[in-house]
Image: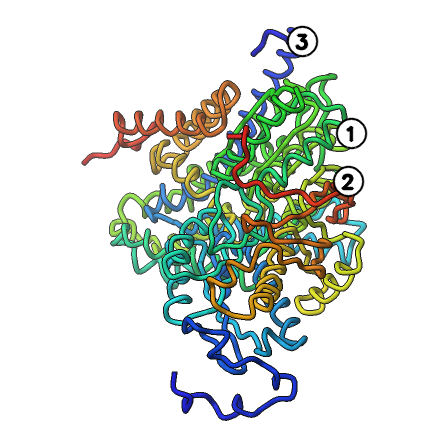
Amino acid sequence: MGMAAVPAITMLPRASFAQAPATSAVNTTGLAVTDTEVTVGILHSATGTMAISETGSIEAEKLAIEQINAAGGVLGRKIKFIQEDGASDWPTFAEKAKKLLVNDKVAAIMGCWTSASRKAVLPVVEQYNGMLYYPTFYEGLEQSKNVIYTGQEATQQILAGLNWIAKEKGAKTFFFIGSDYIWPRTSNKIARKHVENVLKGKVVGEEYYALGSTQFNSVINKIKLTKPDVIFTDVVGGSNVAFYKQLKAAGIDLAKQPLLTISVTEDEIDGIGGENIAGAYACMKYFQSLDNPNNKAFVPAFKKMWGEKTVIGDVTQAAYLGPWLWKLTVEKAGSFDVDKIAAASPGVEFKGAPEGYVRIHENHHLWSKTRVGRAKLDGQFELIYETADLVEPDPFPKGYQ
Amino acid sequence: MFGDYSIGDLGSIFVMQGFAGLILFSVYVLMALGLAIIFGQMGVINMAHGEFMILGAYVTWMTSNVFQAYMPSLFGGYFFLAMILAFIASGALGMLVEWVLIRHLYKRPLDTLLATWGLSLMLQQAYRSVFGAREVGVELPQWMLGSLHVTDSIEVPINGVFVMGLTVLITVSVAYVLYLSRWGRQVRAVVQNRIMAGAVGINTEKVDRYTFGLGCGIAGVAGSAFTMIGSTGPTSGQLYIVDTFLVVVFGGAASLLGTIASAFSISQTQSTLEFFMSGSMAKVLTLLAVVGILMLRPQGLFALKVRK
């Protein structure tokens, strides 16, 4: 990188950047860091099936980067981002991750959404020693030096919700229904162990439908036959819409039949329609309606940047944490070097998180509260319950495998 | 699994399950009819069938928004207008596509597969750019929600009944148009022998265009109806395409009766199996059965008898 190639404008000293530490000191591994700029990558699907879900994450990451820059950047350097499109195709994700790390030498990647895309990218970030901030709640059973998981892993998300509904509704019998892939299957496995061993309840049905399935009348009849105390769902994507519409059409009133979902955020309700899901309980760490000062600043800022009508779901919020946690970690480590960031990550806390407060655990997941919300007609959730303390992330739960 | 239930309970569940099967049957027929015309009659492998359906769904969504904004008092009836508009929009797009793309490919039917697949990708991205990547929620009039209480324990979803009624109506109209009208005779003549049909004075280009438009228009109506039971997003059309081809191929291309018979057998097998085992296993077994039967009978359930 010849200095002559750097445009003259970036050579001009700026007051706020005057104290920035020398690049040679904070970047010993040849990352894309100059005296005034640091480059990160954003890697999500802007096209293809997953664009539905990943658009919110892209928006949140861009907002966070803009806010960090407005506040003076990271170690005196503005964040510049390079956005790549994973196109809902897992090999493309891996290829683009390699491009970001090898060609662009980005200091960190904010990206991935589905577990499949993360699994495709994982060997790449490990081989080329990159740093990935991954926003989605996921099934757990993974931990890497090179990944910070800003969403919840399965036990964090599920157990508190099941405890709550067992206590609050006196629920003993559960009916599980999910889409047929790794996340719902692993989540339901954990949920089943918890229901049977801890809550001493009974799982009266466990059903999986292929991704994209649009016909749920049979399983709805089975639900009517078994009359469970709680329907526990992790159906995703377009199937979600079909499932709730048909549930309502079949005369199951969610005000009387408790339903706990771990897969429906405000984003999904946009497509399902508030009237079809009102009354259902969702178990997440974030709802747009949360009443705390951080969130009251975050929601208007997000809407100002991306439009009044956008909604903010759990994963969008978790994606917003990525750039901030990275910035805080870089400042703690005093360096952009990936090894130093990986080592400095445990213990980093972000007090400005819209969900309240988060802290990175030794295992690179976040300590966070779990909350239960009830869906309202207008597509928002009303907070019903939150755990008193932060829930410890436990990606390899003993007794649940 | 039945030990703990009373006879009455079981009886009503079986009635409802039978009904679920009938609804699935209607859904299959509705989504396959348009393709039965395009693939069955014209031999065009239309991979963009799902996208024509979703166009109908988006038209329905826009109509509902317009009614909500300007004529809230008439909202209860918007769905009928929406279906007509969906038919016109998808049909018009279909005719345009036929003129630009398909008419050059009648002699190369396999190439229509690639061309229409490309078209489906383009349409998906167009929907994404115009309507946004997120799914939209189509609001339904109050009377279409919920279920009919037949007895205390038997409940029949209203939207299911609506889809069934619509399916019967469209099937009868298509059968009439294809088999009893003058235009239908022309369509069948062109399909059987394009050159001879032209020689006896049928305007084959016009017949092709309208036939393709009709198939796409029916897809649009199906898409409009499916806003009641499914999602509306740029890629939602992909959810239907496999089942649609399955029904048409299994029934035997070029046979309307075959399409209906195949939709009936697939949907009943599927919904019966779904009740006794898990959803994904039911799908696997259904597909296996279909593959097995197609190996024994490659032309499908019903086939036109033609001299080879």
- Kindly state the secondary structure of the residue where label 3 is placed: helix
Amino acid carrying mark 2 in the image: Tyr
Task: Using a 10 Å C-alpha cutoff, classify the residue at mark 1 as few (fewer than 14 neighbours), some (14 to 19) or many (20 or more).
Answer: few
Please tell me which residue lies in front, B305 or A219. A219
- Give me the disc on residue A385: 2
| Residue shown at 71% from the left, 53% from the top | A355
| Residue, disc 3 | B8
- Camera sees residue B168: no
Mark 2 or mark 1: which comes first in sequence? 1
Residue B77, given in percent of the width and then of the height, sits at 72, 45
The percent position of residue B76, horizontal first and vertical second, equals 75, 44
B163 w.r.t. B198: above or below: above
User: From mark 3 to mark 1, how far is it between C-alphas?
Assistant: 32 Å
A157 sits left or right of B107 in the view: right
**Disc 2/disc 3 C-alpha distance (Å):** 39 Å
Q: Which chain is home to disc 3?
A: B
Badge 3 amino acid: Gly
Residue drawn where x is 28% and y is 43% of the image: B192
Task: Give how far across and how far down residue A211 sits, in percent.
Answer: 49, 40
The residue where tag 1 is placed is A168
Contact? badges 2 and 1 (CB < 8 Å): yes
Question: Are tags 2 and 1 found on a single chain?
Answer: yes
